[in-house]
Amino acid sequence: MCQDSVQLEPSLLASYSSNAGSRRSPLDNSIYRMLHRVCLIQRELAPMLELQSLFRSYRGIPAVQDVSFKVSSGEIVGFLGPNGAGKSTTVKMIIGMLRPNDGHVLFEGRDIRKDMIAFRSAIGYVPEEAHLYNYLSALEYLQLVGRLRGLDEAVIELKAAGLLRLLDLESWQYSPISSYSKGMRQRVLIAAALLHDPRLLIFDEPLSGLDVVSARLFKDLLELLAAHGKAILYISHVLEVVEQICSRVIVISNGRILADAHPAELAKLMHLPNLESAFTQLVRQQNTRVVAQQIVEIMQAAHG
């Protein structure tokens, strides 16, 4: 979406769009036109992040093929795909950990490889795995991150204290991270990603380990960050949350982009009730009910 309103991989588009016009009600058409106008406005704005025909292979086997999309200021874009679809490889190329074999990653119109230091100072990243220095406390870890980011000591102390307090880590700030729960570690990672006020934020399964209250706080925070002009790429398998907070979703499978659309519009175009159904259909996942029944039958086989 926002390159051409709704994008589906061509063969999928042919399958789902043939009857779309005849089935839309006047209200559906009004919603569609409104979304299209929003996309046209966003398309006029220079994207903060742009991927141009990224290709990456491992030992001759393609992992990512011709991946292109944009994320503009104020957008929360969901990046979805089954395990092994190419999400992690794409993210590693975006943050500069991995070089593409072909294609480019642009930040505010400039190839990130031309100035990696400047680019990394403008991004905040929460990885899927919470790799932290276990012998440091949360405060020491944020102090380390702040110094690596080039922040003044007074600014580091002020921001670290505030973030630890608001993320309910104040009473643990002097304890070693080795004593933290998974949810506490995740909150430390979130604080570290926000510490330097980045313009681009990449969150990979950020709700992992968070309790209900912390997850609600994080969703509210995402909406406020987008309202303040941050560009946000959100990777998750929790499709209910993606459907609630994302202005667009990009679906990748087998290293290729299958769809790029507003969650509701994607489901409507495919004549399905929700994003989860649309996602399952797009990536052609197996019938989970049938597989579950087969698992139960195997469990019970020894008792036959």
Image (tube, rainbow, N blue to C red):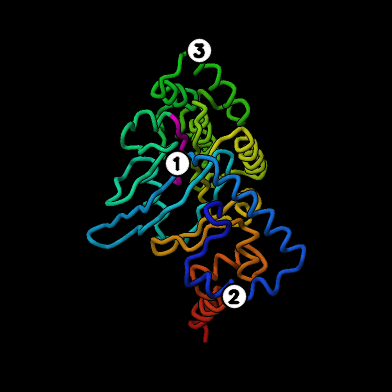
* Mark 1 vs mark 3, CA separation in Å: 27 Å
* Mark 2 vs mark 1, CA separation in Å: 45 Å
Please name the residue shown 37% across and 46% down the image.
92
In the rendered view, tell whether residue 100 sits above or below residue 198.
below
Q: Which residues are magenta?
A: 122-129
Of residues 210 and 157, the one drawn nearer to the viewer in this rendering: 157
Q: Residues within 10 Å of mark 3 (few under 14, many from 20)?
A: few
Q: Position of residue 197 (x, y in %)?
A: 52, 27
Of residues 211 and 24, the one drawn nearer to the viewer in this rendering: 24
* Mark 2 vs mark 3, CA separation in Å: 60 Å
Q: Is residue 189 magenta?
A: no
Residue type pointed to by label 2: Ser
Residue type pointed to by label 3: Ala
Please name the residue shown 55% across and 55% down the image.
1
For disc 1, the marked residue is: 130
Q: Pointer 2 and pointer 1: residues touching (CB < 8 Å)?
A: no
For disc 3, the marked residue is: 154
